[in-house]
Image (spheres, helix red, strand yellow):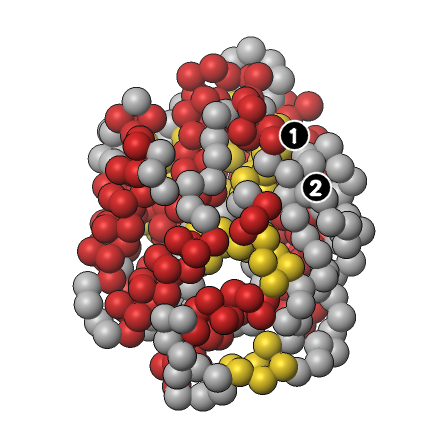
Amino acid sequence: MLFNFYKNKKILVTGDTGFKGSWLCIWLSKLGADVFGYSLNEPEEEYSNFNLCNVGEKLNRVDGDVRDLDFLKEQFNKFKPDIAFHFAAQSIVLDGIKDPHETYSTNLMGTVNFFEALRESTNTKVGINVTSDKCYFNNNWVWGYRESDKLGGKDPYSASKSASEIISSSYLSTFFETKNSSNIATVRAGNVIGAGDWSNFRLVPDFFKSKKNDSQLTIRNPDSTRPWQHVLDPLYGYMLLAYKLYKDGKKFQGPWNFGPLNNSNKSVKELVEELRFYDNSVNYIIKDDKTKVEAKLLNLDISKARNFLSWRPMLGFKETVKLTAEGYLNDLSNKSPYQNRLRAIDYFEKNLNNNEI
């Protein structure tokens, strides 16, 4: 029922050129949705998911900055989406330290402009702002953060995601509680991995860059624990939430966590060793992290999504790493990356219904 729902729906995706945004565009297009992408210029990185899978050829899209309010509004008015997903952001912690102004201007005003465009759209019934698990004020405690826990961030990226959540909450209470307004939500996911992510300063991309370049991998925080999850798990959660918002409305508004089960919260070193099971040619060294900005512990409590959306993560840690490693190795061998993504999605959909994963 969920996947049939998206056939012929008009879906706008900001940040369609990014890792998660491009995966969502592939999935929605497969389901028969009419997808429209909005983001900055297409990525230069040859191995980006967007370029590898020729995503730009599979949807309508424009080059646009989310900080350009008038142009963003114009695209909403032209395309008239039923549902809008807001992925466009500066998404790297260390890049936020290098250029905090760019991070704040994109992540804060991009959020404001998304909701301004949504507020004036007469066609868009659902808007979802994609933030991050980094939005929580991190106490380095062992239990997971709930949606009601304190927001905050010590580095610019994390602070910008906290601010994006506060902006979203403000728009919800001020503009989106009335009967005929759009239904909005924010989604907070953990460390999402999967083939096609070649961003800087990320562990899995760095692993396969070392493979590609025949170089040694450097890891900064081997004992830090993260909620690793395959990209398809949170994307399924976002799609399910959008469906619920479209069908049932206001009671599903607000923030939602989408993370793995507790047994998938593994250390950086454990993830690297699991990746090396699929390619042990990559060796690594441990280097002291001089920035000291990344948290040692970070877990999400997903009780709300499990209880009220009947969502649960389908892919365990080993299955997540398997799909990720096989996807990267497939890409590096130039074996039809787009078909690889479709196979992964088919596998997920099939086993979702059978609960076999």
Q: Secondary structure at mark 2?
A: loop
Q: Earlier in the sequence, mark 1 or mark 2?
A: 2
Taking the image as shown, residue 50 lies to the left or right of residue 210, namely left
Pointer 1 and pointer 2: residues touching (CB < 8 Å)? no
Q: On screen, 238 above or below 265?
A: above
Residue 74, visible in the rendered structure: no
Q: Residue at x 59, y 66 (%)?
A: 268
Q: Residue at x 19, y 67 (%)?
A: 335
Taking the image as shown, residue 231 lies to the left or right of residue 49, namely right
Please state the horizontal and vertical placement of residue 273, each as a whole percent of the image. 50, 71
Q: Residue at x 33, y 46 (%)?
A: 25
Residue topped by disc 1? 171
Please state the horizontal and vertical placement of residue 214, each as a whole percent of the image. 39, 88
The amino acid sitting under disc 2 is: Tyr
**Quarter occupied by residue 125:** top left
Assess disc 1: are there few (<14), some (14-19) or many (≥20) residues with their C-alpha within 10 Å of its C-alpha.
Answer: some
Q: Of residues 324 and 316, which is closer to you in this image?
A: 316
Residue 145: assigned label: 2
